[in-house]
Image (cartoon, rainbow, N blue to C red):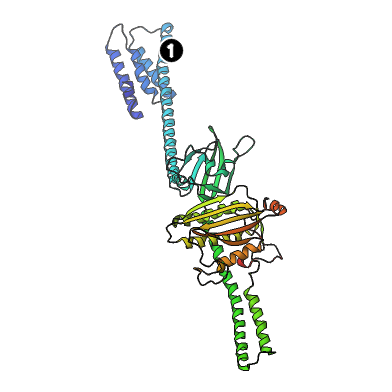
Amino acid sequence: MLSNLLRGSRTAVLIRAGMIIAIVALIDWRVEGPLRFGFLYLFPMLLVGSALNQWQIAAVAALCTVFTEMFDSVAWSAGTGVPRNILVFAAFQGAGLFSRGIALNRRIQENHLHQIEAESEARREAEEQLKVLVESSPAAILTTGADGCVLLANDAAHRLLALEPGSLPGRSLGDYLPALVNVPSPDGKRGSFRTVMQCRGRRHDGEVFIADVWFSTYRTSAGPRLAAMVLDTSEELRTREEVGLHQLLSSSRILVGAVSHEIRNICGTISVVHANLARNGALAGNQDFEALGTLIGGLEKIASMELRQTANRATSIDLAALLDELRIILEPSLRDLEIAAAWNVEPGLPAVWADRQSLMQVFLNLTRNSERAMAGRPRRQLTIGARLENQHVLVRVSDSGGGVAHPDMLFRPFQQQAKATGLGLYLSRAFMRSFRGDLRYEPEPQGSGFVVELSPAPPAAENVGNGAGDSNSAGGRPQPVPGEPQPAARS
């Protein structure tokens, strides 16, 4: 009942308190007898205490004390009246102050509750917005615990790692992004990490990809955590290498075109000399005949020329890492063409001596030729293997494309049977020989195979190549040396 009387505005509560005081005073005035009703003023004092301040409560308590004494049948005297009035006043004021304290605490609690509810609602909205942002993000976002196991991951992370939705939490991140497992956790001596790196990743189905990773480490009450955002940048690598191969072939066409122009000039001269000899009729001791011999010798020399060393920036190369990048480049196109690929790379291969860009272009040319050879065939199998044999590293690229009809014509430029420019194998072998390697053809029972022969890097070059400043490690690019001639294919 009292809680009902306390509801409403401050004015309504005071009106109710005044009415109760008036009713109690009226009853106390009209009813005569030994039982007095002055204690009933405690109820309006509880109402007054919830609406007035301390001095106003004291004034109302004094008024109720006066009413109590006015309608009391006992005669007032200083000896008994003053102590009684003090006790009555103290009781009324104490009731009012008690009610005021409860009301203040209640208002404080209500304000605090409203503040908590507002903060909780704001936090819930922020969490919902963050969840929507994470779930709708095209980048893979995930968090891991101190043991390297995934705690949370969005849909993009599952798609990136070729996993079913919701199956990534609880798995070890080292199975997919091993480089992140080596990130040290923050502690008292070591601060948090906030940086970006590029590393190799592996999907659940074994496909390798290049990943750009933005990550940070932090501490929580449950232990250290790592949050990472991962992007698949394999397409950039594919585009870069494909553009490099295209530029190489374009530059080579210009080079060989210039040589062909000189050959045509010589052939024209030969035709003129031949016409002169035909008109003269005497060959012995004829100067035109001798000139014809000289021109023919020059023509043979030009026709037998190999390309200059267009890859004179050879250095130590991590072949396993290069083959990983080749796999990243090839797998999407092989999958689209429904070509089964087998990779047999012998572990522990030594570093090889080569120009990284040129060697990648050799591999790309061989595999693209295999793709064209297997187009439309019922069985499409590409096998790439690497092993150490007789102090050389051999990389074998074989396919089920049906073989080569004229193997002796393979490494000649401008072949009439070629489906592209007819320069790919010619240039590839020239590149290999430029850094002490070779490229040769080996027939297969149901297809063809090419063997890329590489020389192990000298120990001194290997130490330099494997250092922090190696420009030809995975993802690196050689830098030009002042005064040293540069490859023509890169101009």
Q: Is residue 158 above or below residue 145?
A: below
- Left or right, 403 with respect to 13, comes to right
x and y percent of residue 110 in the render? 41, 29
Type of the residue with mark 1: Ile
Residue that protrudes farthest toward the left in the picture? 30
- Left or right, 305 with respect to 448, comes to right
Q: Quadrant of residue 25?
A: top left
x and y percent of residue 227 in the render? 53, 42
- Secondary structure, mark 1, is helix
Report the quarter where the C terminus lies: bottom right
Give the camera-side residue of 47 and 383: 383
Q: Quadrant of residue 49?
A: top left
Q: Is residue 262 above or below residue 189?
A: below
Q: Is residue 482 above or below residue 291?
A: above
x and y percent of residue 24 in the render? 30, 16
x and y percent of residue 201 in the render? 53, 47
Give the camera-side residue of 78 and 401: 401
Q: Residues within 10 Å of mark 1 (few under 14, many from 20)?
A: few
Please state the total of marks drawn on the protein image.
1
Q: Is residue 300 above or below residue 361?
A: below
Could you tell me if residue 318 is visible in this image? no
Q: Residue at x 56, y 69 (%)?
A: 409
Report the quarter where the N terminus lies: top left
State the residue position of label 1.
86
Could you tell me if residue 92 is visible in this image? yes
Q: Residue at x 55, y 63 (%)?
A: 245
- Left or right, 386 with respect to 58, comes to right
- Left or right, 400 with respect to 303, comes to left
